[in-house]
Structures are given as structure tokens and as C-alpha cells.
């Protein structure tokens, strides 16, 4: 093979990129020691964009299609030298391909709890995770700001930066969602939409578009989860304050049984239970009176608030506490008398 044939083989006639499906976002056409032939074919497939870089500057951007590289399709060629020289005027330039398809199922999550301010609870700590999808929409901006002259730039190379951008805007998302912090776990769609809105500008600044965010789980601190459980319990009993008192009593008794230590502390808990029952009775009467209207007698509202079987059940539970030594005879008699007055 002669020298002329060898040199001709160094010219590029067709430029194209067959994506390998390995998550590559930007790819530099391998043109080392080769020159692009004037009139060569540039193939840009759907979900791709190509740019030409001449002397470190982006010369042109090519969207999907097939192009013949001439001065009509690439005006920058008119400024390149040695056109009238060897082998139909070859020229040297860098060609970069970019994938514009969606990059799906990218994961984000809090490695450590994030501390947020909340108007109801002050400082609270939140854990959350989910996924997001993005695509490249501005190859020129992405090339100048992120990928540069690297041979390839992948989704894995972007992962840490993009995940950090999502986490950075969680605080803004909580504020923009308008969802009370305690209700975030039950309003994940609204929270995800707010997170996407808050994060999108940071993606746009590097040539990307955030297509969507999902929130798969929100973990509230244990103390707030307990409050949420109480709200759920209250929602189950509705406006029936009698049932709510039963619910509260059932929640309190196990805690008293676990007291185990000094008798005075347990007796104090038991006394607190009795006081709580009395307060619950008063609250029940007030709420029932409000529901019945101003014309309803107060006595009727009080009678409707507590049923005899509930009072008897409470007395029986207190009797059990007395039998176990938690309550003294005097304490039991006092609480029993108070409860029996409600039946009068």
C-alpha cells in the first residue's frame, strides 16, 4: 500500500454514534490523528445532538438528521485554512455527541436526617428517599459547564452532583408545598411536585431538564409519628367523645402497668388517669353542648357524653389497679365516687 493510500485512510467520511446503553450522556467522536473529509456525512439520530468544536469554541449544533459537511451546513469551515491542499480539503475539528433521551430511575435519598424548621414544632428532623428523571436539553451549555473535553461523560459521573441538588432543595420544597410538616407522609405527591419545582432551576443552570421527582418514603421522627398516630385514632372515633375517652384510657393503662418502680410514682400516674378521665368528661360535655346548639339543656349534653357501661368499665379497670396495689383503698373509693356521680 502506497503512502497516498495510507494517508487517505486517515480521513473520516462518516461520523455517527451508536449508543451502547451504558448511561453515556456526552461522547467525543474518536478523531485522534484523523481529519474529517470535506463533504463527509454526519449522522445524528433521534434522541441525539451533535456539536462541532473548533479551536476550543462551539462552532455549531446539529439536531437529528443527516448532513453533508460543507460551507453551507457548517459555516465555520470558511475560516479554516488549507482547504485547497491535499485530498479534497480535509479539516481538523472535534465532534461531540450528546444523548437527549430521558435518564430514568435516578435515586436520591437522605443519608442522614435533615433538620428543618417548622412553625408548629420548631426544629424537626426528616428522612426521605425517592427517584427522579432528567434529560439533556442544552448541549452547548452542558459542554462548557460540565463535560468539557472528556472523551465520555456518564450518568454515574453526574449522580453525586444531581442527588446533592435534590437534597439541597428539600427545605424549599417543604415551604412551597403548603403541606403541614406532620402531614407530609400522607401527601407525598404534593411534596414531590414542590421538590421538582424547587430543584428544576439548578438543573437548568447546567443544561439539564428535571422531568419529574417521586417521593417513595418519608420517615418522621418518632415523637412526631406518635402524634400522627394519635390524630389517626381521633379520626377513627370522630365526634364520639365517649369512644375517644375509651381510646385514651386504653392507651394510658399499658404505660401505668409498665411503671413498676416506686409506689408513689405509680399512684401519681393512677391519680393522673383519674384526673384525665374527669377532664375528658368535662370536654365531652362542652363539645356535646356545642353540637346540640344553644337551645339544648346542659344536663342533656352531659348525660349524652357518657354511657353507664363506660363508667362501669372504667371502675372495673380502677378496681384491678387497686387489687394490684397500684391504687390505695382511699384513692379507689374517691375515684369510684366521682364516676358514680356521673350516673346520677
Image (cartoon, rainbow, N blue to C red):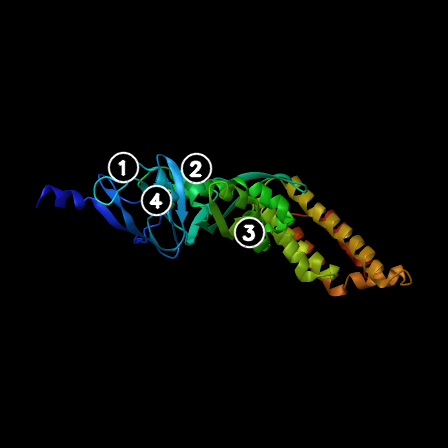
Q: Nearer the viewer, mark 2 or mark 1?
A: 1
Marking on residue 82: 1
Q: Are discs 2 and 1 less than 8 Å apart at CB?
A: no
Q: Residues within 10 Å of mark 1 (few under 14, many from 20)?
A: few
Label 2 SS? helix
Query: What residue is shown with label 2?
Result: 145
Q: Nearer the viewer, mark 2 or mark 3?
A: 2
Label 4 SS? strand
Label 3 to label 4: alpha-carbon separation: 34 Å
Q: Is residue 241 left or right of residue 117?
A: right
Q: Are discs 2 and 3 less than 8 Å apart at CB?
A: no
Which one is in front, 109 or 35? 35
Q: Nearer the viewer, mark 1 or mark 3?
A: 1
Q: Is residue 189 left or right of residue 107?
A: right
Q: Residue at x 57, y 48 (%)?
A: 197
Judged from this view, the residue extending furthest toward the front is 84
Query: What residue is shown with label 4?
Result: 96
Query: What residue is shown with label 3?
Result: 192
Q: Nearer the viewer, mark 4 or mark 1?
A: 1
Amino acid at each position: 500500500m502506497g503512502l497516498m493510500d495510507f494517508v487517505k485512510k486517515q480521513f473520516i467520511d462518516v461520523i455517527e454514534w451508536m449508543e451502547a446503553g451504558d448511561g453515556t450522556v456526552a461522547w467525543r467522536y474518536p478523531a485522534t490523528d484523523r481529519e474529517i473529509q470535506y463533504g463527509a456525512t454526519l449522522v445524528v439520530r433521534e434522541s441525539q445532538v451533535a456539536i462541532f468544536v473548533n479551536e476550543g469554541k462551539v462552532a455549531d449544533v446539529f439536531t437529528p438528521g443527516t448532513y453533508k459537511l460543507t460551507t453551507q451546513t457548517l459555516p465555520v469551515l470558511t475560516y479554516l485554512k488549507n482547504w485547497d491542499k491535499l485530498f479534497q480539503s480535509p479539516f481538523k475539528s472535534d465532534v461531540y455527541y450528546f444523548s437527549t433521551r430521558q435518564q430514568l430511575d435516578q435515586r436520591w435519598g437522605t443519608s442522614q436526617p435533615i433538620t428543618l424548621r417548622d412553625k408548629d414544632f420548631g426544629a424537626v428532623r426528616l428522612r426521605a428517599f425517592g427517584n427522579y428523571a432528567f434529560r439533556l436539553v442544552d448541549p452547548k451549555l452542558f459542554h462548557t459547564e460540565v463535560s468539557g473535553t472528556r472523551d465520555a461523560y456518564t450518568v454515574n459521573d453526574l449522580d453525586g452532583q444531581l442527588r446533592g441538588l435534590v437534597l439541597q432543595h428539600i427545605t424549599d420544597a417543604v415551604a412551597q408545598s403548603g403541606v403541614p410538616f406532620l402531614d407530609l407522609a400522607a401527601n407525598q405527591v404534593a411534596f414531590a411536585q414542590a421538590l421538582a419545582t424547587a430543584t428544576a432551576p439548578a438543573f437548568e443552570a447546567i443544561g439539564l431538564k428535571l422531568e419529574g421527582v417521586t417521593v417513595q418514603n418519608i420517615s418522621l421522627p418518632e415523637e412526631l409519628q406518635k402524634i400522627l398516630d394519635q390524630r389517626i385514632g381521633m379520626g377513627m372515633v370522630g365526634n364520639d367523645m365517649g369512644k375517644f375517652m375509651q381510646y385514651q384510657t386504653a392507651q394510658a393503662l399499658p404505660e401505668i402497668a409498665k411503671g413498676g418502680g416506686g409506689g408513689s410514682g405509680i399512684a401519681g400516674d393512677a391519680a393522673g388517669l383519674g384526673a384525665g378521665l374527669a377532664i375528658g368528661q368535662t370536654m365531652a360535655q362542652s363539645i356535646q353542648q356545642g353540637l346540640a346548639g344553644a337551645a339544648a339543656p346542659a344536663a342533656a349534653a352531659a348525660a349524652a357524653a357518657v354511657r353507664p357501661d363506660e363508667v362501669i368499665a372504667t371502675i372495673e379497670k380502677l378496681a384491678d389497679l387497686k387489687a394490684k396495689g397500684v391504687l390505695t383503698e382511699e384513692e379507689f373509693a374517691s375515684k369510684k365516687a366521682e364516676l358514680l356521680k356521673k350516673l346520677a
